Image: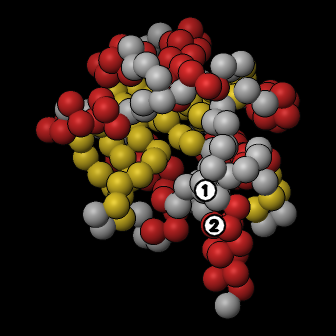
Amino acid sequence: MRLGIVLLAAGAGKRFGGNKLAAQVHGKPMYLWAMENIEEMKTELPAVVVTGTPEIVSAAEAKGMIAIFNGQPELGISLSIRLGIEAVIQEDRKVDGILFMVCDQPWLEKTTLVRLMSEFDGGILALSYGERRGNPVIFSREYLKELSELSGDIGGRQVMARHRENVRFLEVNDEKELQDIDKREQIEVIERQEEI
């Protein structure tokens, strides 16, 4: 399977109270954890980072990724999804699907991403832990047009809901991998737990 990657990194971080993607997690900016996972997978297929932050643009380009600037994060995640899809297709028109990642899951393991990509055989494949569902999600090519037509702050969950019969889940070993950071206190809580 030929899978492009889109890393969504343009959120405003309102609930966090500042630029959450630049917040330090174990000594480095949160966004770097996701980028380094992608870099370490050494995929030759397009890896696109959509962001509204010059710092993240520079970091992506330094790692050989395609950086797409989204100057209108207030329009919601749908714009970032569309920009990411357009950039992947422009680089490789033969992709079988796209893996969509977010930048605020610093505890996601590279080995989980590798498993997710190797298990994908079409349809829609997402991560889970018990009843909890989460990112990343792989959408096969047939859903890319539908994803591109989303509007506002609505992401892939809407497309998944329309095609439940084609959605599968891959279980992670640790629920922490699915933890997306909305508030600064979440980082502090998890880091304290790791020290115990």
Do residues under tags 2 and 1 come within 8 Å of each other at their CB atoms?
yes
Task: From the viewer's perspective, tell me whether residue 65 is left or right of residue 105.
Answer: right
Task: From the viewer's perspective, tell me whether residue 167 is left or right of residue 6.
Answer: left
The residue type indicated by label 1 comes to Ile
The C terminus, quarter of image? bottom right
Relative vertical location of residue 171 with respect to residue 143 in this rendering, above or below:
below
Q: Residue at x 76, y 46 (%)?
A: 18
The N terminus, quarter of image? top left
Task: Tell me, for residue 181, which label it has, or none.
Answer: 1
Q: Is residue 25 visible?
A: yes
Residue at disc 2, secondary structure? helix
Residue 98 sits in quarter: top left
Residue at disc 1, secondary structure? loop
Q: Residues within 10 Å of mark 2 (few under 14, many from 20)?
A: some
Q: Picture coordinates of residue 24 (x, y %)? A: 80, 58
Q: Picture coordinates of residue 110 (x, y %)? A: 58, 55
Task: Tell me, for residue 186, which label it has, or none.
Answer: 2
Whole-angstrom CA distance, mark 2 to mark 1, is 6 Å
Task: From the viewer's perspective, tell me whether residue 88 is left or right of residue 49.
Answer: left
